[in-house]
Image (cartoon, helix red, strand yellow):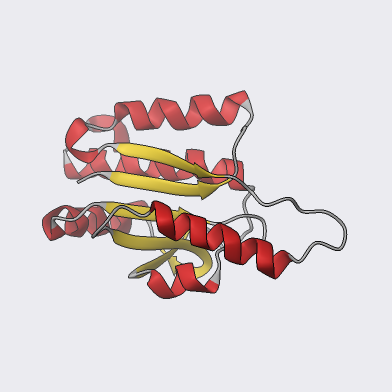
Amino acid sequence: MQIALIAVGSRMPTWVTLGYEEYARRMPSECSVKLVEIPAGKRSKGADLMRIMQKEGEQILAAVPRGARVVALDVKGHAWSTETLAKEMDGWRHDGRDVALLVGGPEGLAIDCLNRAEQCWSLSNMTLPHPVVRVVVAEQLYRAWSILSHHPYHR
């Protein structure tokens, strides 16, 4: 199973890139995580934010690998503990498909992305800065993998 983390935004601060890469590097090849960056639309005073969000959504959906399970990260999704994420990941592995995790821009995900998702996951009731989401998701995926593999990292 390959996991595509499809996220709006590029040119992240160095600490975000290093944090994400550290945990993505730790994942085994049979469960690798690949970041796909979608350029954020230009937000300026008077910009049509719904149109920008829709265009970003189209680009996100175009980046989803064919046949992949789609999981939207959204504040209205289900809050999973790390152990629950491990169970979900185990189900994903047994499903035999790749997984696409979708992260929207400042306004969130377009409705088409949410409608396409088979699952909706909330990292927190709090709004997190989108760069932080990349690092948290990569770390939690690695932690969930460590639980499934009986690796000592989770302890």
Q: Is residue 11 above or below residue 89?
A: above
Residue 114 on image: x %, y %? 46, 71
Task: Please name whichever residue, 44 or 70, is drawn nearer the observer in this view of the structure.
Answer: 44
Count all numbered tags in the image, as a single digit: 0
Where, by quadrant of the figure, is residue 55 drawn?
bottom right
Q: Residue at x 56, y 31 (%)?
A: 16
Query: Quarter-wise, where is residue 88 in the image?
Result: bottom left
Q: Residue 124: image x %, image y %?
A: 53, 59
> In the shown orientation, is residue 51 left or right of residue 30?
right
Q: Nearer the viewer, residue 101 or 124?
A: 101
Q: Is residue 17 above or below residue 9?
A: above
Asked whether residue 108 appears in the rendered view, the answer is no
**Residue furthest out toward the right:** 45
Question: Could you tell me which quadrant the C terminus lies in?
Answer: top left
| 88 or 103: nearer the viewer | 103
At 16% from the left edge and 39% from the top edge, which residue is drawn?
Answer: 149
Q: Is residue 32 left or right of residue 35?
A: left
Where does the image place residue 25, in percent across and percent down from the top left?
A: 34, 26
Where is residue 43 shown, x and y percent of the image? 77, 53
Residue drawn at (13%, 55%), measured in percent from left and top? 96
User: Is residue 66 visible to the viewer in this orientation of the structure?
Assistant: yes
Q: Residue at x 25, y 41 (%)?
A: 145
